[in-house]
Structures are given as C-alpha cells and as structure tokens.
Image (cartoon, rainbow, N blue to C red):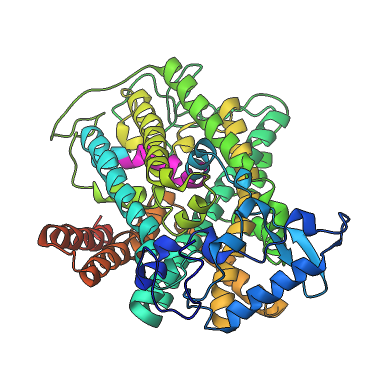
Amino acid sequence: MEDDCRPLLSSEQTGESYSHRGSTDSLDFKAKRPFYVEPRNIVDDGPQERVSAEAAILNSRVHYYSRLTGSSDRLLSPPDHVIPGPEEIYIYSPLGTAFKVTGSDPSSKNPSIITIFAIWNTMMGTSILSIPWGIKQAGFTLGILILILVGLLMLYCCYVVLKSPKAIPYVDTSDWEFPDVCRYYFGKFGKWSSLVFSMVSLIGAMVVYWVLMSNFLYNTGQFIYNYAHNVNMSDSEFGTNGSEKVICPSPNPNPGGNSSISTILYLSSSGNGTSDVSSFERWWSKTNTIPFYLIILLLPLLCFRSASFFARFTFLGTISVVYLIALVTIKTARLGFHLEFHWFDTSEFYVPEFRLLFPQLTGVLTLAFFIHNCIITLMKSNRNQKNNVRDLSVAYLLVGLTYLYVGVLIFAAFPSPPLSKECIEPNFLDNFPSSDVMVFVARTFLLFQMITVYPLLGYLVRVQMMGQIFGNNYPSFFHVLVLNILIVGAGVLMAKFYPNIGSIIRFSGATCGLALVFVFPALVHMISLKRQGALRWPSALFHSFLIVLGLANLVAQFFM
C-alpha cells in the first residue's frame, strides 16, 4: 500500500537502486510485459477476440505511462500490480482485438534433459570421424589427456560466453547473441571480426561436408556397382584377411612382408572384363568426378530462399551418431583390443604414447567442442534458467564421453599387427572396405544427413553475411548465386586437391577458436570484471593464458 501512495514522478526507488532496475538481472518478464487484458474483459471468445471498454481504458493508461518518459527508462513503467503474470497476458491491437500470448507460457520451454541432448546433438558433427586419427597423432595416452583438458577449457569458455550478456548493465540484452556482446565491448571491430570468424567455422564445416559427401557418394556407388556386377575387390586392398576386414588405404611401401596381407587383385569370373572396371573408375572417381557431380544436386538447393524444409531432417544427425556408436561397438567386439605401450620410441606397428604432433588433435577438438556462437540461443529455451550452467556441464560431459568412446575404441581395436596404427585415416570409415555392409549403411545415412544439413549451413552463411553487408538476407538471386558458387567452389577444390578432413577441421577449428573461444570470451570477461572493480591478478593471468593458448594452437597448425 505504501508503494501505491508514492507519486508517479518521484525519483525515489523502492527497495532497489535505479541502476539495478536497469541491469539485466532485473530484466524479468515484468519489465517487458505487453498489454494485459483480463479474461473477463474479453467480450467475444472467437478468433478475433473483442475487448471491452474497460480494457481499452486500461490500455490508454498504459500508453500514458509510456509517454511520460523514454522507453529505456524504467522509472515510470506501469506498476506491477496492474499487470499480472505472463501466463495470462494478451496483446492488445489498435483495431480493438486481443490475442493470447502463447510464447510466454512456461510449458513451451524445454526441460533440462531436452536442452542437454539438443546441445549434444548440435556439437556432434563430422569431427567425431577424425577423433581416432587425432588420438593417433598425439599418442594414445597423451591424446586421452588432451581430450579431457581441451573439453574442460572449452566448457569454461562456453560458460563465459553464456553469462556475458548478463554482465552488461542498463541495456536490454535478452535477445543478444555473442557477436552483439563483442560489438558492445569492441565496437565495429568486434562486430565484424566475430562475423568473419563465425564465417570461418561455417564455411570450414561446409568444405568438410563436401569432402565427406564426395567420399560417401563414391563408396556408396562403388558398393552398388561391385554388388551389381559381382566384382570382388577384397583382395585388391591393402589390409587384413578374415570376415572383419580392415584396410590401409595409404600403406607403407615396406609393410614387412606379413603373410596375412594380400595385394593381389581378384576379379570374379562373371563375364566383366578389366576394361569395364577401368571405364567405371574413370567416370566414378573420388577426386576427379564425384565432387563435380555434387554441384548438380547441391547448388540449386543452396539457392532456396528458405531452409525450413531441410530443418525437418535434423533428426537424422542423432540417428547417424547413434548408429556410428553401435557400429564402433560391434566392430570393437569382433576385432578385440590391439595395444602395446611404447612411451617415446616408435615401433613397426605402434605409435608412441606421447608425440609432438599433438597440436593436430587440439585443432580438431577446438572445432569438435565448438558451440560458442549459438549457446546463448540454445539456453534461452531451457525451462529453468537457474540450471543453465549445470545442463551445459552435463552436455559437455556427454559429448566428451562420446568422443572418448569412439576415439579410444577405434584406436584400440585397430588390428596391429598386421597393420600399423599409422594407417588410421582422418575419416576412420575409410579404414573399412566399400564392401562392408554395416559401413555402407553408415555412409548412406551420413550422406543423406549431410545433403540435408549442407543447405542449412549455407543458409546461415547467407543470412549472417548478406544481412550484415546488404541489410537483407536475400538481396537478389544474383547475389545469392555468386555467394553459393564461391562456397561450392571452395568445397570442390578441397575435395579434388586436398581431401584430408583432419587437416581441414584442425585449421578451421583453430582459426575460429582463436577468436570465438579464447580471445573474445577472455577479453570480455576481464573488461567486465575491470569495470566492476572486481578484476584480480590471478583471473587476469589465467584469462591472458587462455589467449596465448588459443594463439599457440593456431600457429602450431602450420608446423605440423
């Protein structure tokens, strides 16, 4: 009652300072409520709900409050007692209609379990195929330690990004993303640099997708051709014998003459000559023809004005990852473990436990754990915002365990001897022949998934780039076509001349991670603490070390 008796133009605040009322901590639903109409004031409950004269008077009163001061000034906002909770809010139209606000219903938010798996599903990308290769490059023991350490660092930096908008006072940051935070602290430089590095991560992912789609389409076509023409290529590939064949696409010229390895080409006598096979290989080449065939399919899809159709197939990502985990489990159970620990010396079939090539793994992991440019949006849909940090930590734990599971099992099960661990490919599916039925299913799943996700990535690139440059997400068909040709051209060139997804992932991961994972989050955190007078030297030292770490991660990629 005491609050109701205070004059409207009084500069006094009740229970809190004006600065606190303007901070993001006070930006709850009360500060942003639309006009409220009580249910009893809804005259007609039809599709166009008419409001009564009493509701119209209340609307005029709210408009009067809003004209007394600027929209950013909360001093003269409508009192809380005249605006009920968000679950009973209606939006008033000047035409005399009112509509229920459904988005403010807490039931429309996701529970923690949905949020956790949404983060897990978003992070699970093509990097999972390169984790065994990365562990091989770093060494088995050092690779496991690096995976855990990088996961923890990425989690902390993601936590800093998540809480960065809330540390900005006097500004409504409820719809901000991290690039907006960078613009607030660093001006146009922060805005454009964050956009550039975000483009690096997206276009890098699209290039990796093109290389993988060329790979999967090639192997899928090879499987179908061999099956249709009764061609047996099992003995033409350098690898193990037996029912669970594992191959080494790039064998050592001196394999040691092991008797269990066959290198003799065998073609079954089905009336198909070698010339037929040569003709097929000429027109169905992984690097010379397949990358160009994909242009016919994917370039028109990139030019779609909306990507909503392709968003319906995002569930295929979850199915693909689950199938990959099942595939790894079955293959490991059949192949068994093949491990020997050589701490620093190299042997014929095994790699040392600690290798100087470990930055290749850190580059891959930087992209594998990268979700920093969209974590704020994902967490907005969480029903209980107090659990954001906990849910983020659980999601990172699940992602880390998934990477560990796949990486450790593939490395441990790789048959050494007769094959060397050095044969593990940047895409571990390449270590299985095209005739393997289970791997054929995995490649087909992944191919279809990537065909549907690739236009979504192109749409994100177009929206961010065209929106910032032209102020329009679709300025014209010509602009969009030129952008898409450049993106597709980059993918075709890499698929033809350098189809090494491990190196592409580590370079793009280290590049975008430098800015969006290490430098900007650390600087934002230190500047925010300094403005609050809470920056201490241990925190400054640690976050400066993160910046140096990100820079060293990028520089090291050029010396590997």
Query: How many numbered discs sit on the rendered protein?
Result: 0
Q: Is residue 312 left or right of residue 76?
A: right
Give the x, y percent position of residue 166. 38, 62
Pick the quarter of the image with the C terminus.
Answer: bottom left
Quick one: 496 or 283, which is closer to the camera? Answer: 496
Quick one: 413 or 163, which is closer to the camera? Answer: 163
Q: Is residue 495 visible?
A: no
Tell me the chief SS of the magenta region.
Answer: helix
Q: Which residue does the image show at 32% across and 50% down from the upper left? A: 154
Give the x, y percent position of residue 340. 22, 23
Give the x, y percent position of residue 147. 29, 40
> Please, is residue 456 above or below residue 135 in the view?
below
Q: Which residue does the image show at 89% across and 55% down from the upper left? A: 46
Which segment is the magenta one?
121-134
Q: Which residue does the image show at 55% across and 81% down from the upper left? A: 469
> Please, is residue 168 above or below residue 356 in the view?
below
Residue lying farthest left?
Answer: 537
Q: Is residue 304 left or right of residue 532?
A: right
**Can residue 122 be found in the magenta stretch?**
yes
Q: Is residue 399 left or right of residue 457?
A: left
Quick one: 282 or 476, which is closer to the camera? Answer: 476
Q: Which of the 4 image quarters holds residue 273?
A: top right
Give the x, y percent position of residue 98. 78, 63
Q: Which residue does the image show at 45% across and 27% down from the upper left? A: 246
Q: Which of the 4 image quarters holds residue 486?
A: bottom right
Q: Is residue 515 visible?
A: yes
Quick one: 516 or 438, which is closer to the camera? Answer: 516
